[in-house]
Structure formats: structure tokens, C-alpha cells
Amino acid sequence: MEACIIGAGVIGVTTAWQLAKDGWQVTLVDAANEPAAVTSHANGGQLSYSYVAPLAEPDVLPHLPQWLLSPNSPLRFTPRLDPHQWSWCLRFLRACTTRTAARSTAQMLTLSYLSRSVLHEWLAETPIEFGHAFNGKLIVYRTPKLLDRARSLVAYQAEHGSAQKVLDADACVALEPALAAIRKQIAGGIYTSSEESGDCARLTRGLADRLAARGNVQLRMGTAVHHLERVDGAVREVVLVDGSRIRADHFVVAAGMGSVPLLAPLGSRPALYPLKGFSLTVPCARGEVPAVSVTDYERKTVYADLGDRLRIAAMVGLGSKDNRIEPARIALIKRQVAELLPRIDLTHAEAWAGQRPATPDGRPLIGRSRAARNLWVNIGHGALGFTLACGSGRVLGHLMAGTEPEIDAGPFTPNC
Ligand SMILES: Cc1cc2nc3c(=O)[nH]c(=O)nc-3n(C[C@H](O)[C@H](O)[C@H](O)COP(=O)(O)OP(=O)(O)OC[C@H]3O[C@@H](n4cnc5c(N)ncnc54)[C@H](O)[C@@H]3O)c2cc1C
């Protein structure tokens, strides 16, 4: 059987890896010249298996005025005359209930734990160097109220298999001495020893390089798909912007935010909205940077040691529709980094911006599209695409083969 996958970000490449392993003839096509050129390029590097709670949770509501008004808020909302934005926001607000957030968290944990075991399985078969570190994650809270709220999430997640520890401020600094500079501002933290980190782009490219060497995979980079041609309820071929065509038995759209314009002409409208974020990549030797992955909770900033570089990612912007690197936001991140890690030299920090392809309730859409019987989607991984990629590829592989996935795929069924 032949499959054509559109999109060579981390989601498309892990899907291709699973299908190629399952014996499919795979064509992987992407507009960019190399894999992981868009959102998978310089993300936060967190393999955050135990932190999959959606952004849509009840705690969001009291913070909305601050997001709208403060230029220094890590979350920023730019209202637009865009019905898609308002309908997405409405669905997001509807998902901000304790019940919905708890249900989504439990469902996402099944996918994230599967992702972890699939990644480990693939790496055992095919080692790939991508700065993979098993260094745990420490989330630091500055206010006792938020720490208390985190305590209840820890208790809830423990019921679903997460082992996490609540630490006081001294224990946080003992675990991660780099936090000494802000010791007085820390209320405490949550430490999860099982969390991992790594460079998403290097993993994606490592997998893509090995796929290119396989006899059953063809990579077509540097050619955008113009549209999908549907005949009698099935996609017959994809038409590329250079006029060439790719025929296959099945088609997978895994094109991140680019999935929306590809699916729209087929009448398929996934509720995806871009949540903009930024990262800094700083050349550093191991030992100069935090040994554990640190998240500064109130600032919504994550720090990951990629081996030879420190990756810092921050900010969530709803309504900024381009990938422009905004100097004021980057300057704010740099000030916050200097406060947390005063010894880090940011002179050569490389700034980047990306758009998280987000669904209102945080759950990705993995499965058959309603638009055609041989059309599948693997989209909407929001802030967790690196974390969830391998499990998402595995689940889609099972669905396309007509076999039972290891987890219940029902919560991720596309409604588009
Ligand atoms: C600031 C920031 C920090 C993040 N931190 C983390 C983190 O720490 N951990 C984590 O798990 N996740 C993180 N994420 C989220 C993660 O990066 C994304 O969820 C993930 O990269 C999405 O992957 P994707 O393959 O769906 O999309 P992309 O990586 O955007 O790939 C889509 C691909 O489709 C191609 N494409 C689009 N349209 C077409 C077309 N018409 N024809 C051909 N090709 C097309 C594009 O060129 C692109 O290569 C972060 C994101 C951001 C922005």
C-alpha cells in the first residue's frame, strides 16, 4: 500500500517512520528544503510526558484581564476581526472547566506515556544523537497559592501514573543550584524525575535521514502541495505547486498550521489556531546551565540543556499570525533569563519564533478525516508536538492498518 504524507515536521516524520516500519511505500512531501524547518525547528525541547494538562483550565479565567492589558504578560491576546479566532476562543473558554480539563489531562497522559515508550523503542533499534537527556523537570512556583494548586494536580496525576515530588524553596535550590539567584522569590517546586529533553529538529532530521536511506520511502522536499484532488469521496492525488502530482492509496495531512488551507477546499475545517511563542538558543558548555529542565511557572518559560546549547522557550500569543521575531518580546525574555541565570552570556543567543498548532481543548486530532475515506490527519499538537509525536505516529499507523491501537484513540478522533 502507498501512503503520501504532507508535512515533514516532527509529526509527519514520526508518522512516516511508523508507516515505513509497517511496510508501507511512503512519500513524504514538504514545502521546506529540509525537515523540521517550521514549528519543529527550535521549540522548548521538553519531552514533557507528565505535564500534558491543557492550557484551557479554570485558572485561566481570572488571568484574562491581565493577558489583555499587560505588555509584559507571558500570555498575550490580540483580538482580531476574525470569526475563526472568536469561535476558537469560545470553544477554548468552554473547555476551561475542571471536569473537561481533568478529562483531557487523563486522555493526554495515555498518549504521552505511549509516546515515551515508542520513542525509547525506536531509539533502542536505531540510535539517534539529539541531545536526549534524562534529567527530570523542576517546575518552580513563585506564589504559595499556585504551588498549592499544583499540589492538587500532582495528586490527580498520581492516580494516572505520574510520580512527582513537591519541594520547598531550599530543596529546589539543592536540586538545581543555578536557582540560587532567585531563592528568595521561590515558593517551592514540583520535581518529576522521569521527564526528558532533547533537540526536536535533530531528532526529526535524524529520523528523516534514515528514512531517506530506506527502499520504501521517498522524500520530496522543497515542493509545496497546492491542493488535494478528491474524486468520488476519495483523494486520488496531491497536486504540487510545480504542477507534478503524487498518487497514493492513502494520504496523511500532518502539515501543522499549513493543514488548515489544505483541508479547507475539501470542506474540512479543523479547529486549529496558532499560539505564537519564542525561543532563544544559547551556546553553552554542559555545567554552565541548569542540570535539570527548569520551568519558571509564572513566566511560562522553560529551560532545556541540549548538550552544547541551552534552549529557552517562552510566551503564548493568541492572535499574532506571523512568525516575526518581535524585539520587545525577545528583550523581555532576555531580562527574565538574566534574572534567573545571571551568569549566562546571552550575547550570541539565537532568537526564533514559531506557531503552536493548537486545538481549543489541547487534544490533537489523529485519525480519519471526514472529508474523504482515504484521508487521514495527524494535527493540532499545540505546545506538545515533540512530546506526543511518536505515540501519535504509532496510533495513526494502527488506525490506517485497521488494527487496534495500544491506547483508546477515541478522544483524538478528528471532527473535520
Ligand atoms: C515556542 C515553542 C515552544 C515549544 N516547546 C515545546 C516543547 O518544549 N515540547 C513539545 O513537546 N512541544 C513544544 N512545542 C510544540 C511543538 O513544537 C509543535 O507542536 C510541533 O513542532 C508541531 O509539529 P508539526 O509537525 O505538527 O508542525 P510543523 O513542525 O510546523 O511541520 C509542518 C510541516 O508541514 C509543512 N507544510 C505546511 N504546509 C504545506 C504544504 N502546503 N505543502 C507541503 N508542506 C507543507 C511545513 O513546511 C512544515 O515543515 C513548542 C512550540 C513553540 C512554538
Image (spheres, rainbow, N blue to C red):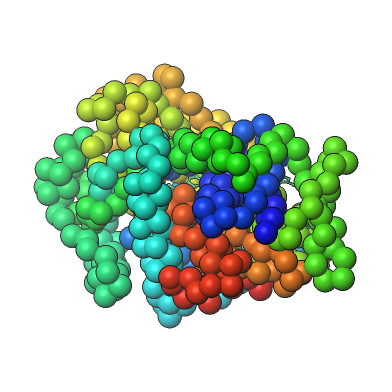
Does residue 338 show up?
Answer: no
For the point 60% across and 41% down, the residue is 215
Q: In terms of image quadrants, where is residue 248? A: bottom right
On the rendered structure, is 401 left or right of 290?
Answer: right
Percent x, y for residue 52?
Answer: 40, 61
Left or right of residue 372, residue 217 in this image: left
Give coordinates of residue 40: x percent, y percent. Answer: 54, 42
**Which residue is more in the foreground, 154 or 71?**
154
**Residue depicted at 51% across the width and 65% down the height:** 395
Residue found 53% across the figure and 72% down from its top: 403
Q: Name above or below for residue 397 compared with residue 282.
A: below
Which part of the image, by quadrant, shows the C terminus?
bottom right
- Residue furthest out toward the top: 347
Q: Would you say 225 lies left or right of 186 here?
A: right
> Where in the figure is residue 413, as x and y percent of width and height?
59, 73
Which residue is at the front of the view, 71 or 372? 372
Q: Residue sitting at 83 percent across and 46 percent down?
A: 245
Question: Could you say which is closer to the camera, residue 179 or residue 163?
Answer: 163
Give coordinates of residue 205: x percent, y percent.
52, 36
> Quarter of the image containing the N terminus?
bottom right
Residue 306 in view of the camera: yes
Q: Is residue 339 above or below residue 416?
A: above
Q: Is residue 183 left or right of residue 205?
A: left
Seen in the picture, residue 236 relative to 6 is either above or below; the reply is below
> Which quadrant of the view contains residue 286?
top left
**Numbered disc total:** 0
